[in-house]
Image: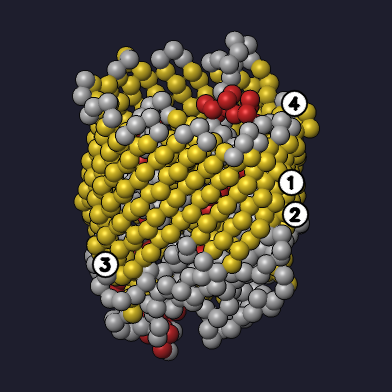
Amino acid sequence: MKKLLLPILIISGSPMAQEIIEEQRIEKLDKVEVIESTENSTSTVKLLPENAHSIIDTSDILKKFPGANVNRNGPLTGIAQYRGLSGSRVNVQIDGTNMQESCSNSMDAAMSHVPATLVDAVILKRGISPVSSGIESIGGSVLVQAKNVQGHADEFEFGGEASLGFSSVNSGKKTSVLLSLASKTHDLYLGINSENGDNFDFSDGTNFNTEYDRDFYLMGYNYRGEKQHLSIKYNYNDTGNTGTPSLPMDIVYAEGGVLNVDYSYDWSENLSIDTMFSHQNTDHLMSNYLFRNTTAKKESFTQVNNNSYSFVMNTKQTFGNLALAIEGDFTTHQADISNPENAMFNITNFDTHKNRNSFYVELESELNKTLNLISGMRYTIVEMDANDVFSSVSMMQNQMGNLHRILQQRFNAANRNITDNNIDLSFNLQHQLNENLSLEYGLAYKTRSPSYQERYLWLPLEATAGMADGLQYFGNLSLNPEHATQVELGLNYQDDQFTFSPHIFYHQIKDYIQGTPTTSMPAPPNTLTFNNVDAKLYGIDIELSYTLSDNITLNSVSSYVRGQRTDIVDNLYRIAPLNTRLELLYSQKYWSLSSELVAYHAQKKVSLTNKEQATAGYGLFNLAGTYSINKNASLAMGINNLFDKKYANHLNGYNRNNLNLDVGFDMTNLQAYRLPSEGINFYATLYFNW
Ligand SMILES: [Cu+2]
């Protein structure tokens, strides 16, 4: 499967590249490296691990990728966005497992699962992801690789690394340790991360409540035989009281993780098999009174349970490299709303399952010396169902009781067992024009089945996978899957001094799932119902790097995406505005300095249907430095938002916390106050390795 990766972008180092990186670490800290891949002559961009030093949440790394961004609902709640699509449209995998969110509002967002200190690499397949990258990948694929180790010596060797970090804007502290015992054939490792922070400051005050508290553990074992590899990994995320001010509730806790077993066997040079099994279980409690002043106390307890499998056969044939695979997953979601002061109050929000079984075939063929084609076809059966629901409110003899009673009866009487038969196709053609210049053409047809929220949200609630638009939604049992036709054209130029890669794309999405004004009755005013509409997204993202001298490099990433409805005149909701990053890096043998300009355009192309408010543009200036103290220790420090600019990131939502006085709150208008982002922040991180 890994052989079929398209141009990928990697932030921080992968274990395979660790040796190369070790050598370059001192000299090229923070440099974006363009490495020629030997596999398909496609370029791979890498940033070194130290680049994550100012980041709390792993998803923030996405802002450095062309075309990518993050919808942030809290300090540990970052939802991946790629080219204007987010949520379940983006296939986020942690160590090869499709990560499931327990929270019906995605507070435990998949990309936030592994803390930045224990992430080895974040890989984004730029452009159209081949069908092999995931079961539903309409909005692209993001892979997070947690840290791992690989020994090289005959005898076991102890190894380890540790980091200690501080950030001033929120008095944030983080500590991480990774210990390993590794040899040529066996590796054992254990990683621990602990972090917490207070509410962050901005120039006019404090953003209440953005505090966070999390511990994270990972452990694993690898076996490398001559023909077979086995790896067993387990991770566990223990998030405590953590704010999500753009959502109606906050995180009381989210506890759970993934067990992943991967086994591969090389039958011969031309045939190998790769099998994977994983299990995930996460429990989560959220409440509307933890950090807020509430008279009507509510809490929601959610659980996710997932088992997934994959069986991939890779063969080398005369006509190319062929991959055949069967994979799938079985997921249950439960969410129950209760009132801690009234034991009689009880609402089944969700009690659903979603089973996906999928088959794909993918072929990588060298058509001639300059043309490389990856073509794939995937067939997926998605089967979903929901159990009967109950609301204690339905027993009340008033208007609210009437609403709950009718909706509950209607839902329980409906057929909720739904099966979708989905087909995905993808073609990626790489054309090497000369030594320095290549063109990429992509064409795909991708499908996504509705999420359990989009299908089964039977009561009008804001349980919408972190949309954070302040609106209540109804699910819809008659939704069709989304179908996207995607076209991509990319140019990659690379010489000793200069790299330049602009990519343009166009997506036409039929049956795009979007909330539209509710027409069914009874319904509270201003409620939306998930519906199939039509949409298109198009844009360009550009990556550029210029080596001015041995010590000075200029790096830049720019992204533009436009999302529109095509059935009516409206814009798509929560789309990143035009943005660019320009970094000037000066590096010496033992230290480096970088200055970065980040500029975001205003976003006025907002969704009227979602009552989305425009945001102003802004520019930020960041400074960073690194110093290698000795062979075993280094220091990274910097200042973000040097001029303490007050700004609102368009993707961070509105304040929903009524105690967040410095930001402002209006109960009658939930879109009244955009959440401000961090003011000036000084941070420092010490690294050790042995
Ligand atoms: Cu939640």
> What residue does disc 4 label?
631
Depth-wise, is mark 3 or mark 2 nearer the camera?
2
Q: Residue at x 56, y 66 (%)?
A: 649
In front: label 1 or label 3: 1
What residue is disc 3 on? 534
Identify the residue at image location x=63%, y=29%.
24
- Distance from disc 1 to disc 2, alpha carbons, whole Å, reads 8 Å
Q: CA distance from mark 1 to mark 3?
A: 47 Å
- Name the residue at 29% across, 17% down: 270
Q: Among all residues in the image, which is located at the extreme bottom?
A: 398
Left or right of residue 167, residue 150 in this image: left
Marks 1 & 2, CB-CB < 8 Å contact: yes
Crowdedness near tag 1: few (<14), some (14–19) or many (≥20) residues, C-alpha within 10 Å: many
Q: Which residue is mark 2?
A: 682
Decide: marks 1, 3 in contact (CB < 8 A)?
no
State the CA–CA distance, disc 3 to disc 4. Answer: 57 Å
Q: Which residue is mark 1?
A: 637
* First along the sequence among labels 3 and 4: 3
Drawn side of residue 269 relative to residue 20, left or right: left
579 and 341: which is toward the camera: 579
Amino acid type, callout 1: Met
The residue tagged with tag 2: helix, strand or loop?
Answer: strand
Q: CA distance from mark 3 to mark 2?
A: 45 Å
| Disc on the earlier residue, 1 or 3 | 3
Identify residue type, mark 4: Lys
